[in-house]
């Protein structure tokens, strides 16, 4: 995963705990998960819209 091994991930985790505190880490993870989920949905919708637009340009009916 991005060239990070176990020692590097441990260092990142320790730094994150020092900066944000142990109580804030789950909230940050939750916010990151929601952000990634909405990004995936947005990318998927734009792909679907592009396919529909392409079909309309060719004169094919929508599915």
Image (tube, rainbow, N blue to C red):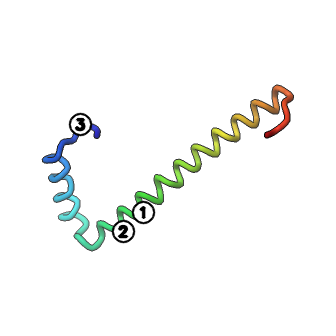
Extreme left residue here? 7
Q: Could you say which disc has been placed on residue 3 in the image?
A: 3
Label 3 neighbourhood size at 10 Å, few (<14), some (14-19), many (20+)?
Answer: few
**Residue 5 vertical position relative to residue 14 in the rendered view, above or below:** above
Left or right, 24 with respect to 10, comes to: right
| Residue in view at x 35 percent, y 64 percent | 28
Which comes before the other along the chain, label 2 or label 3? 3
| Label 2, label 1: how far apart the Cα atoms are | 6 Å
Left or right, 47 with respect to 7, comes to: right
* Residue under numbered circle 2: 27
How many circles with numbers are drawn on the protein? 3
Left or right, 38 with respect to 23, comes to: right
Q: Quadrant of residue 54?
A: top right
Extreme front residue here? 63
From the viewer's perspective, is the residue at label 3 or at label 1 nearer? 3
Mark 2 secondary-structure assignment? helix
Could you tell me residue 48's position as x and y percent?
Answer: 67, 40
**Residue 53 vertical position relative to residue 58 in the rendered view, above or below:** below
| Residue in view at x 53 percent, y 48 percent | 40
| Residue in view at x 60 percent, y 44 percent | 44
**Discs 2, 1 touching: Cβ within 8 Å:** yes
Q: Could you say which disc has been placed on residue 31 in the image?
A: 1
- Quadrant of the drawing holding the N terminus: top left
Q: Quadrant of residue 52?
A: top right
| Label 3, label 1: how far apart the Cα atoms are | 24 Å
């Amino acid at each position: 995963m991005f060239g990070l091994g176990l020692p590097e991930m441990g260092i990142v985790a320790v730094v994150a705990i020092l900066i944000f505190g142990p109580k804030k880490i789950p909230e940050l993870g939750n916010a990151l998960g929601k952000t990634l989920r909405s990004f995936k949905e947005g990318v998927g919708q734009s792909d679907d819209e592009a396919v529909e637009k392409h079909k309309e340009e060719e004169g094919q009916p929508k599915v």
